[in-house]
Amino acid sequence: MAKHEDLPVPVFSALEPVYGGGSQLEEAQLRFDGLKSKFVEVFGQAPDIFARSPGRVNLIGEHIDYEGYSVLPMAIRQDTIVAIRKHDAGESPKLLRIANVSDKYTMCTYPADPEQEIDLKNHKWGHYFICGYKGYYEYAKLKGVDVGVPVGLDVLIDGTVPTASQRCFTHFSDLQRSTLFCCILVLMRCHCPVLILCTQDPRMAELNAV
């Protein structure tokens, strides 16, 4: 049996294989259509792709999976969906514009630079995306995969996993975990579909601890 990190990232061109039929599919279709419309409203163009990552609960184990220990997680219906557009190489300035469908979160803008430092004294919700962004490029470099010169990205995030209410901002809730992983899936699909990132790799521990 293949290890999970050797399996390809599932890619679909329709919602039915993911959501099935009936009311759940209808609900998902309305949500994706709304996300696309909001993306056009915010960025002026349609997204290239969507990526979805379900929230999870750990029945056994917490913060030990990336150290190689066994856990028993279970996916839940609540999830995070990311819509993204990859800028052309000639577009400038090269920026990462990260927005959220919720007015609670203002747009965050960062340079399209995987080497940038995260300002930990100035907490922003977009930092979680940047953690995934930096982690992807670091992992690609480690694997010797050339993913090309970084370009700008327009990103719109929609999450239905409740945020942590009794945790400090710097502690990952399931929503932030889901968003981070979803970000990495999107980047893999946009830049290098053959690169598979193992979330149990010990090198991901630093990102999970930010």
Image: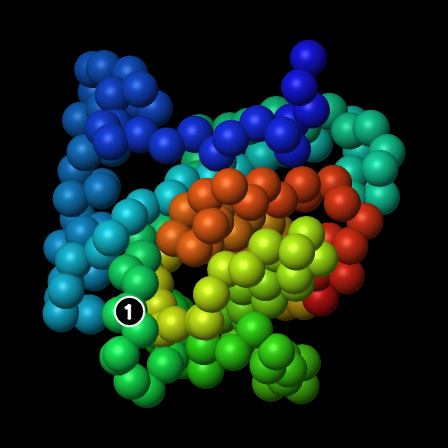
The quarter of the displayed image where residue 18 is located: top left
Place of residue 172 in the rendered image (x, y in percent of width and height, measured from the top left): 65, 56
The residue closer to the viewer here, 53 or 203, is 203
Q: Residue at x 25, y 21 (%)?
A: 16
Q: Is residue 158 visible?
A: no
The mark total stands at 1
On screen, residue 62 above or below 155: above
The quarter of the displayed image where residue 135 is located: bottom right
On screen, residue 42 above or below 143: below
Residue 41 horizontal side relative to residue 89, left or right: left
The quarter of the displayed image where residue 168 is located: bottom right
The quadrant of the rendering that contains the C terminus is bottom right
Residue 43 horizontal side relative to residue 56, left or right: left
The residue closer to the viewer here, 102 or 99, is 99
Judged from the image, the secondary structure of the residue bearing numbered disc 1 is: loop
Place of residue 64 in the rendered image (x, y in percent of width and height, measured from the top left): 82, 41
Type of residue at label 1? His
The residue closer to the viewer here, 111 or 142, is 142
Residue 76 horizontal side relative to residue 166, left or right: left
The residue closer to the viewer here, 162 or 134, is 134
Q: How is the image coloured?
A: rainbow
Q: Residue at x 59, y 49 (%)?
A: 177
Q: Residue at x 68, y 13 (%)?
A: 1
Q: Residue at x 86, y 34 (%)?
A: 69
Place of residue 198 in the rendered image (x, y in percent of width and height, measured from the top left): 67, 41
Q: Is residue 181 visible?
A: yes
Q: Which residue is mark 1?
A: 87
Place of residue 142 in the rendered image (x, y in percent of width and height, measured from the top left): 71, 57
How packed mark 1 is, by other alpha carbons closer than 10 Å (few <14, some 14-19, many 20 or more), is some
